[in-house]
């Protein structure tokens, strides 16, 4: 097959046989798929040889760019030893070494690491762990959860049950377990129509009302600390997370922090919880954990939670949960290499000027006639487009405004994927200032062009 035929074949076979996630396939089949063949640093190249700056880190996972030598080498070295072995009844060196490193990142306050292989399973593990913990503690009625409107915790049914994005989650309503829902800390569109800071964090008061009334039935509060990412890069106001932690302690419910998106440097600190010196009882990690190379997740718990599961074999206190690829050695080797890079390259320190650059640019965007709100924490940012700035009226879903911006950016060599009317900007932490500036210029032009 010559090159042109080969390309044609791949495009056709994709349209015929692949069912893409979160994608209206009827539309997809009418278009031409962009087939990626190569990556280098913050850029990816398609089958025609066109390069794109990867503006969303391969959907929020990539940390140090593509083909990072240290990670490549770590995986290759591990392939030469063993690629996979089970954690059920056996252990392996990369998984042990990684667990040790992870718990030290939390100063041992979260001392137990339960591995799985993606963000949704990390959340399932957290929910089941919290539920069984209270069963084992004799608090049999603590069987429910409190989650937030606009929350996203993954696509498996437990994770969807604690989710709060109607457009994704409503269809599955009859399959889900009931949870209590607290308001989203979404100041731009406050559910109570209040203004920050005069509101005195009214959303926290609302959460407290639920806890006051129902804490005896609630096992845990689950939250995306600081940034409700898939909900539209919604940044919670200062002090919100800290107060959620205080409420959980006061009402004797566990706090599950889902740092699947925010973890590993995205917000400017290693974990978002650090911004408000919060220690959760359970934390969910995935996405950036392997630098965006391989599927891996970890759910960390306190020693206190772990100890509740100890007992005689016959007691059946065991946590009966596990996955085939739990603790995969290749993925753990990649994750270990990433943690070394964070140290060696002082990634968190070096991303600060880039976060500042992004913030400046957002300031410029804010004055555009169809930009309603801009939000940023570290290198996670969202630009919310509105039809009418005065009334905050959104573009209709079918206007596809976010998609129009993304298509325009794509034509000009930047890959982004919007969340409805929110333009998401989430480049690899290692992106060069030049690439970042170039990318922001393209996105800015795309916003102006699509909204004018
Ligand atoms: C992406 C995401 C998940 C789900 O992770 P998957 O690996 O896609 O299953 C869970 N929680 C948050 C906060 C996320 O952003």
Image (spheres, rainbow, N blue to C red):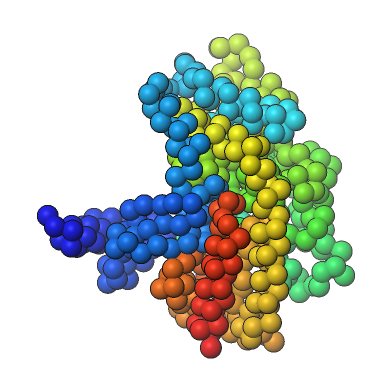
Q: Position of residue 397 (x, y in %)?
A: 49, 76
Residue at screen point 36% across, 52% down:
38
Q: Position of residue 66 (x, y in %)?
A: 46, 48
Q: Is 170 above or below relative to 373?
A: above
Q: Position of residue 161 (x, y in %)?
A: 55, 50
Q: Which residue is at the front of the view, 152 or 377?
A: 377
Q: How many marks?
A: 0
Horizontal placement of 91 versus 36: left or right? right
Quarter of the image where the N terminus is located: bottom left
Residue at screen point 73% across, 39% down:
280
Q: Which residue is at the front of the view, 161 or 372?
A: 372
Residue furthest toward the front? 434
Instruction: Give the quarter of the image for residue 233.
Output: bottom right
Would residue 297 be seen by someone viewing this image from the given angle? no
Q: Is 370 above or below relative to 239?
A: below
Q: Which residue is at the front of the view, 70 or 275?
A: 70
Q: Position of residue 314 (x, y in %)?
A: 55, 12
Horizontal placement of 368 versus 192: left or right? left
Residue at screen point 87% across, 64% down:
200
Instruction: Give the quarter of the image for residue 412.
Output: bottom left
Q: Is 273 above or below relative to 3?
A: above
Residue at screen point 75% across, 30% down:
107
Would residue 382 be seen by someone viewing this image from the given angle? yes
């Amino acid at each position: 097959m010559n090159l042109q035929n080969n390309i044609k074949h791949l495009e056709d076979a994709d349209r015929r046989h692949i069912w893409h996630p979160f994608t209206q396939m009827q539309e997809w089949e009418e278009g031409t798929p962009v087939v990626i063949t190569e990556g280098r640093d913050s850029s990816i190249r398609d089958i025609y040889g066109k390069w794109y700056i990867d503006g969303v880190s391969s959907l929020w996972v990539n940390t140090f760019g593509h083909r990072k030598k240290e990670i490549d080498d770590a995986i290759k070295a591990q392939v030469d030893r063993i690629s996979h072995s089970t954690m059920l009844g056996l252990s392996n060196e990369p998984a042990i070494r990684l667990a040790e490193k992870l718990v030290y990142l939390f100063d041992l306050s979260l001392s137990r690491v339960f591995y799985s292989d993606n963000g949704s399973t990390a959340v399932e593990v957290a929910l089941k762990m919290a539920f069984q913990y209270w069963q084992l503690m004799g608090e049999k009625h603590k069987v429910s959860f409190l989650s937030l409107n606009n929350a996203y915790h993954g696509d498996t049914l437990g994770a969807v049950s604690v989710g709060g994005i109607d457009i994704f989650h409503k269809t599955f309503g009859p399959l889900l377990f009931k949870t209590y829902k607290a308001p989203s800390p979404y100041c731009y569109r406050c559910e109570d129509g209040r203004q920050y800071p005069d509101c005195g964090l009214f959303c926290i008061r609302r959460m407290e009302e639920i806890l006051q009334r129902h804490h005896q039935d609630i096992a845990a509060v689950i939250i995306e600390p600081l940034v409700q990412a898939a909900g539209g890069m919604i940044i919670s106001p200062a002090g919100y997370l800290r107060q959620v932690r205080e409420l959980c302690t006061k009402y004797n419910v566990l706090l599950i922090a889902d740092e699947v998106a925010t973890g590993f440097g995205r917000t400017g600190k290693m974990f978002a919880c650090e911004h408000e010196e919060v220690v959760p009882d359970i934390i969910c990690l995935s996405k950036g954990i392997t630098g965006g190379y391989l599927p891996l997740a970890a759910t960390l718990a306190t020693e206190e939670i772990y100890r509740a599961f100890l007992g005689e074999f016959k007691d059946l206190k065991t946590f009966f949960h596990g996955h085939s690829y739990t603790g995969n050695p290749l993925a753990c080797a990649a994750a270990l290499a990433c943690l070394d890079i964070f140290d060696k390259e002082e990634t968190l320190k070096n991303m600060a000027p880039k976060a500042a650059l992004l913030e400046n640019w957002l300031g410029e965007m804010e004055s555009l006639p169809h930009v309603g709100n801009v939000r940023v924490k570290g290198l996670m940012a969202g630009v919310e487009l509105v039809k009418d700035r005065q009334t905050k009226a959104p573009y209709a879903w079918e206007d596809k405004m976010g998609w129009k911006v993304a298509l325009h950016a794509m034509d000009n060599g930047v890959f982004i994927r919007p969340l409805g009317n929110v333009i998401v900007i989430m480049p690899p932490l290692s992106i060069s200032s030049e690439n970042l500036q170039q990318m922001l210029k393209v996105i800015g032009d795309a916003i102006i062009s699509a909204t004018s």
